[in-house]
Image: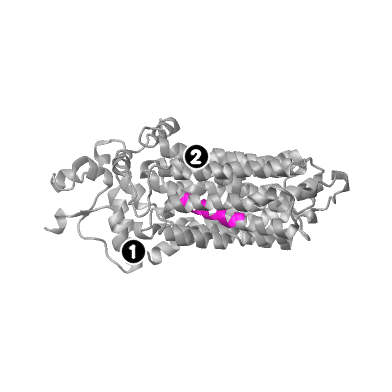
Amino acid sequence: MKHESQTYTVDEALVAIGFGNFQILVLAYAGMGQVSEAMEMMLLSFVGPAVQSAWGLSSHEESLITSVVFAGMLVGAYSWGMVSDNHGRRKGFLITAMVTAGAGFLSAFAPNFISLLVFRCLVGVGLGGGPVLASWFLEFIPAPNRGAWMVVFSAFWTLGTILEASLAWLVMPTLGWRWLLALSALPSSMLLLFYGATPESPRYLCMKGRRDDALNILEKVARMNGTKLPPGILVSDYEIELHGKDTESEDTQFLSPRQNGDLPPNGIDSKKGGILSLSMLLSTELFRSTLLLWVVFFGNAFSYYGLVLLTTELNNGNNKCILAQSQSKEPHDVSYKDVFITSFAEFPGLLLSAATVDKLGRKLSMSTMFFLCSIFLLPLVFHQSRNLTTGLLFCARICITATFTVVYIYAPEIYPTSLRTTGVGVASSVGRIGGMLCPLVAVGLVHGCHQTAAILLFEAVVLLSGVCVLLFPFETKGRDLDDSVSNAKQVNAAL
C-alpha cells in the first residue's frame, strides 16, 4: 500500500534505471542519423567544384548547389518537428530517413543542373529532421549524464565528416562525384533497415497521456540495463502540476486525459498545427530564449559551414586572386588533404565540449569558444601561407565544433516536451538560413578577391553569437527536462 501512494516521473525513472545497454542501442541508431547528415553536408564542399568543372557552371551556380540543400533543410526542420511533436518521434525520423535516402541516390543520376538542384533540395528537406533524432536520444538519458552523453552523440557527426572526407579522397579522383553522392546516401538507408527495432520516447508518450505505453518501454529499459524502476506509479509533470502529488486519491489523480477525449496535456492539436506551436515558442515564457537561440543557431551554422567551404576556397588558388582563365578547371583543385586534416579538428572540439559542458555549464562553454574562434579567424583578414591558413582554420573549427555541440545540448533542454522538437526544429531552420547564405560569402566574396570582407563578416557573426549566449536567461546544467510550458515558466522565474 505504501508503494501505491508513491509516484515517480520519467526523469526519476531514468535516473533510477541509469545509462546502460538500452541507451547504447538508442545511441547507435541516433548516431547513424548524425553520420548521415554529416556526410551529406560535407560532400557539398567536394561536389560543387567538381560539378562546376564538369558542366561549366558559374560561381553563382556552384553556390546554389549548397544553398538549395539549406533551403530544403529550412522547410524540413520545421515540418518534421511538427510531425514529431504531434505524431511521435519515430514517425518523424522515419519520414526524414526515407526522403534523405531516396533523394540522395537519385541525385547521383541527375542528368542536368536543374534536376541536381531539385534532388539536393529534397535531400535537404530530409536532413531537416536531424533535430528529431537528437531530441529522441536526449529523452532517454538521465539528467546527471545528459551533457556528457550528448557530446558522445555529437561525436557521430565528427565521424561522418571524417568518413566523407576520406571517401571523397578515395572516390573523387577516380570514380567522380556521382559515385560520391550515391555512396554518401548509404547511412540513411541503414536507418530504414533498423527502424522496426526503435522504441518511442516514453517522455513523449507520457506527455500524450499514454502512460501505460510509456511504462512498458521504461520496464523494457530497466530489464535491458539490469536495474529496476522506482516503487510507485508513473506520472507526468503535467499531472503533478495539475493535481499535486499528495492531494488527491489514486483513482482521480492518475486518470489519463485521453479517457474524456481531451487533448493531450500541453499537446498541439494537429488540426491547428504550426501557427499555435510558433505562437507558444514566442510566448512570454519563451520569447527571450527563442530569439537568442535563433541568433546563435544562425551564427553557428553560418560559421561552421563557412569554415568548411573556406578550407577549399582559400587553399585552391582563389585566395591569391588568380584570374579565372588562368586557373585549372580540373576538380583536383580541391585540396582533399586540407579538408581531411581540418575535419579532425572536430575531435578536440568534442573533447573541449565534453570537458566543459557539465563543469562550466552550457552558457560559459559556448561563449568562450565563440570568442576564441574569432581570435583564430582574425589573421585571415590578410592573405596567409597555405600551412598557416590551414592551421588557423583547424583551430577555428575546433571552437565552432564545440559551440555547435553544446548548443544542440542546450536547445532541447530549454523547451518543454510538448514543444521540444518543434522548438529545436525551428531554431535549426533559422540556422539553415545561415547555411544558405554562407556559400555566397565563402565562394562569392573569395572568388571576387574580397577575402578581407568575407573574414570580417564571419568575425561579426561569431562575436554576435557569443554575446547572445551570454544573454540567455538561464543555465540548464543538471536541470530535469520540463513537460509543460507553464512548468518551464515556473522554473525560469525561479532562476
Q: Earlier in the sequence, mark 1 or mark 2?
A: 1
User: Identity of the amino acid at label 1?
Assistant: Gly
Which dot marks residue 294?
2
Q: As drawn, which residue projects farthest toward the right?
A: 326
Camera-side residue: 241 or 269? 241
* Residue marked by disc 1: 18
Q: Residues within 10 Å of mark 2 (few under 14, many from 20)?
A: many
Distance from Cα at disc 1 to Cα at disc 2: 33 Å
Q: Residue 489 in the image: x percent, y percent? A: 31, 39
279 horizontally vs 73: left or right: left
**Residue at x 31%, y 54% (from the top left corner):** 11
Q: As drawn, which residue projects farthest toward the left?
A: 1
Camera-side residue: 22 or 342? 342
User: Identity of the amino acid at label 2?
Assistant: Trp
Tag 1 near tag 2, CB within 8 Å: no
Q: Residue 202 in the image: x percent, y percent? A: 34, 52
Q: Main secondary structure of the magenta part?
A: helix
**Residue at x 76%, y 47% (from the top left corner):** 51
Is 130 inside the magenta-drawn segment?
Answer: no
Q: Quadrant of the C terminus?
A: top left
Q: Nearer the viewer, mark 1 or mark 2?
A: 2
**Residue at x 67%, y 54% (from the top left corner):** 182
Is 406 inside the magenta-drawn segment?
Answer: yes
Camera-side residue: 456 or 423? 456
Q: Which residues are magenta?
A: 396-409
Residue at disc 1, secondary structure: loop
